[in-house]
Image (spheres, rainbow, N blue to C red):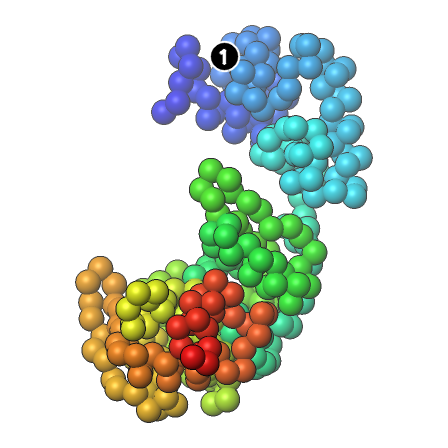
């Protein structure tokens, strides 16, 4: 338990965020209101504002006015205040924080098109669903790829960059998107160990889904003639069977270490797979960094 000078930090913050006044929190904790106020300032829950309650109210008014036209991320940047403090203030002021601050095309995954199938494959490999939130987080060097997805789904929000981890993230709340991913592509929450093949996907769209999956969690080796990926046994079996059928290549074994993985080996096999995978791709339905490796190695005329 996080205590400072005998006071329970989490309890103080929790009571204050529940809407209790400083005086009410002080009464429950058994200390003075001044002590509670000083602790809330120390914890960063309220600004110091020179200890002036009037200044604190001015800040509340600024946040309220900004929230009419800005989202919490933007307010945080404008006022240089952590997002969780802004959320806390809005809650205490009785303002319902809208979960859907950004809009997307919620029907994007409702049909089987090259773009929707590709990005469903990418999410199946390297995206995530939590409750009603759909998200993708990738390395910053591939941020343009995430921007392409943002444009396709008509996302009105921003891509978040995590500088300390060199990652970028796009996430949004959409019940309909979550349901279309489940119904059409078998993509569900906590999918890493239970992902199943997208059995409803039309035959001509399979290549796009597999390309997305390989871009998300697969590879073409730079210095060797190897194409591989990892996932559940079921999804790898489905990928292997379709690649073998459409490309007329062998059936590699699916091996298990900490996870299931498989590899197609040999220049001839990798070249066939590359030509099949990228034949009908474009900048919106392929990861350029991986495509450049494949293009230089297998697709360019020598």
Indicate whether 251 appears above or below 64. below
Q: Residue at the location (69% across, 14% down)?
A: 49
Tell me residue 137's x, y (percent).
49, 54
Q: Residue at the location (31% across, 75% down)?
A: 236
Residue 198 appears anywhere in the view: no
Q: Mark 1, residues whose alpha carbon is within 10 Å: few (<14), some, or many (≥20)?
A: few
Q: Which residue is outermost to the front?
A: 302
Q: Residue at the location (46% across, 59% down)?
A: 128
Which of 12/267 is in front?
Answer: 267
Q: Residue at the location (70% across, 36% down)?
A: 75
Q: Quadrant of residue 264?
A: bottom left
Q: Quadrant of residue 59?
A: top right
250 on left or right of 291: left
Indicate whether 282 appears above or below 221. below
Residue 285 appears anywhere in the view: yes
Indicate whether 212 appears above or below 113. above
Tell me residue 121's x, y (percent).
46, 72
Kindly state the secondary structure of the residue where label 1 is placed.
loop
Which of 11/72 is in front?
Answer: 72
Q: Quadrant of the C terminus?
A: bottom left
Tell me residue 191's x, y (percent).
38, 64
Which of 228/254 is in front?
Answer: 228
Count of numbered labels shown in the rendering: 1
Q: Which residue is mark 1?
A: 30
Q: Quadrant of the N terminus?
A: top left
Tell me residue 12's x, y (percent).
51, 22
Which of 155/225 is in front?
Answer: 225
268 on left or right of 51: left
């Amino acid at each position: 338990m996080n205590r400072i000078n005998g006071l329970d930090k989490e309890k103080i913050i929790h009571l204050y965020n529940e809407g209790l006044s400083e005086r009410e929190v002080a009464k429950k904790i058994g200390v003075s209101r001044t002590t509670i106020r000083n602790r809330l300032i120390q914890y960063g829950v309220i600004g110091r504002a020179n200890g002036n309650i009037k200044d604190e109210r001015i800040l509340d008014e600024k946040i309220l006015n900004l929230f009419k036209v800005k989202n919490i991320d933007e307010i945080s940047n404008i006022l240089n205040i952590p997002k969780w403090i802004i959320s806390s203030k809005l809650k205490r002021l009785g303002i319902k924080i809208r979960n859907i601050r950004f809009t997307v095309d919620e029907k994007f995954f409702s049909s089987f098109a090259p773009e929707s199938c590709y990005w469903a494959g990418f999410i199946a490999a390297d995206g995530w669903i939590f409750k009603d939130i759909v998200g993708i987080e990738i390395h910053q060097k591939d941020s343009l790829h995430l921007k392409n997805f943002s444009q396709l789904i008509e996302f009105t929000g921003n891509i978040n960059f995590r500088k300390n981890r060199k990652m970028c993230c796009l996430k949004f709340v959409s019940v309909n998107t979550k349901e279309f991913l489940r119904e059409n592509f078998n993509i569900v929450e906590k999918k890493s160990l239970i992902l199943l093949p997208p059995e409803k996907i039309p035959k001509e769209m399979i290549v796009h889904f597999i390309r997305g999956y390989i871009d998300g969690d697969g590879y073409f080796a730079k210095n060797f003639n190897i194409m591989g990926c990892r996932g559940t046994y079921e999804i790898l079996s489905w990928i292997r069977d379709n690649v073998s059928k459409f490309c007329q290549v062998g059936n590699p074994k699916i091996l298990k270490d900490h996870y299931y993985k498989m590899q197609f080996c040999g220049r001839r096999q990798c070249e066939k797979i590359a030509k099949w995978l990228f034949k009908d791709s474009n900048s919106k339905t392929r990861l350029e960094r991986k495509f450049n490796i494949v293009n230089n190695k297998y697709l360019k005329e020598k």
